[in-house]
Image (cartoon, helix red, strand yellow):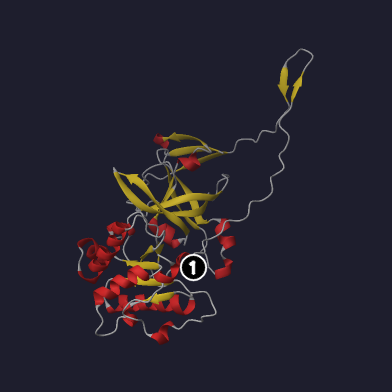
Amino acid sequence: MSGTERRREPSTSPNDSSHNTDSSKATPPQAFLSYAWESDSHARWVRDLAERLQGRSGVRIILDQWDLVPGSEQPCFMEQSIEYSDFVIVICTPTYAERANNREGGVGYETRVITGEFAKKKKIEAGKFIPVLRSGEWESSLPIYLQGTHGVDLRNDPFLETQYELLIRALHSEPIKPPPIGPRPEFAPRTETITTYQGLIQPLEVEVRSAKVNQVKWEAIYPGPSIDVTVMNSRHVIEARPDIGLEYPEPFKTKALLDTGAAVTVISKALAKHCKLYQTGITEIKTLGSLQRCGEYAAAISFPGMNLRAVDPIRIISADFIKEPFHACLIGWDILRNWRITFDGRSNCVTIID
């Protein structure tokens, strides 16, 4: 459908005074907020979000709390709000997911309308349905029809401004732009060879960095070879975010378990939240035969008291740790492959050569 048709008002017209727009400016995007009536505080939070999106972020919001007037037909309001809005923002909670999956109440009816759109159209507008996580975890709060859809995490009070920025960028079709491609670097000449009078080929001398040996003992209370690490946001993230006044905590020191069987480095969800790591996406990892949905972050890890080089940036993911607080970080093969490691289990000692 055309952009003009999509922004046509639902039959239950919103209050004109709350939707005044300046005709001299480009038509703002229109979004419908779908949520479950769970409590007065939850409804108030949804209204606060709607007021911020419309009053401060330039998005026209269709919300039942101000658009559904007494005497209106609620099913018709839902149908037209979903069909004619540019976006549908789904406020995800465990209650919402349960009602949507079981087709209960107003949420269930909206789910029928949404899944009906999927069925009758060969292709739904990319990014029209945006999940916003308000409570619970993605696994328990995301309705089935939105499984696999990338969302925005607005849990906690206040929620992370970086996540809110991702939402309004999506609504205004203004994704984060990568930096421009820089000039081609200047490369040092390749190592030349010298042919002696005997006809032997010998390489020029190359400086060899001396190996740095670290020996670490871990206490018997830990489940395996462990070292101290500090975790924080990647330097690139910190340098790129001063425009919205984000504050980052000091690097957090914790105990890390070395695991040669893990493909990637993983931290606990609690640690990722404490360090306020910048989330770059959602990924899935397989644990105990099942898939676990995890956050993906751009982070930095250093090793206090050791001469190992810091790793910055590194792709890191979060998961539930069973044995916290014994350790909240698992160093995987993505870092371990840079070192030569020897374990001595009888003396609880690990030797790391950088």
Give above or below for 309 relative to 175: above
Image quarter of residue 110: bottom left
User: Which is more toward the observer, 7 or 100?
Assistant: 7
Give above or below for 8 relative to 229: below
What's under tag 1, amino acid-wise? His
* Image-based side of 248 in relation to 96, left or right: right
Callout 1: SS = loop
Evaluate whether residue 30 shows in this view: yes
Evaluate whether residue 216 shows in this view: no
Q: What is the total number of numbered labels drawn onto the structure image?
A: 1
Q: Which residue is mark 1?
A: 172
Residue 40 in the image: x percent, y percent?
28, 79
Question: Alpha-carbon neighbours of circle 1 within 10 Å: few (<14), some, or many (≥20)?
Answer: some
User: Which is more toward the observer, 241 or 15?
Assistant: 15
Residue 24 in the image: x percent, y percent?
54, 80
Image quarter of residue 226: top left
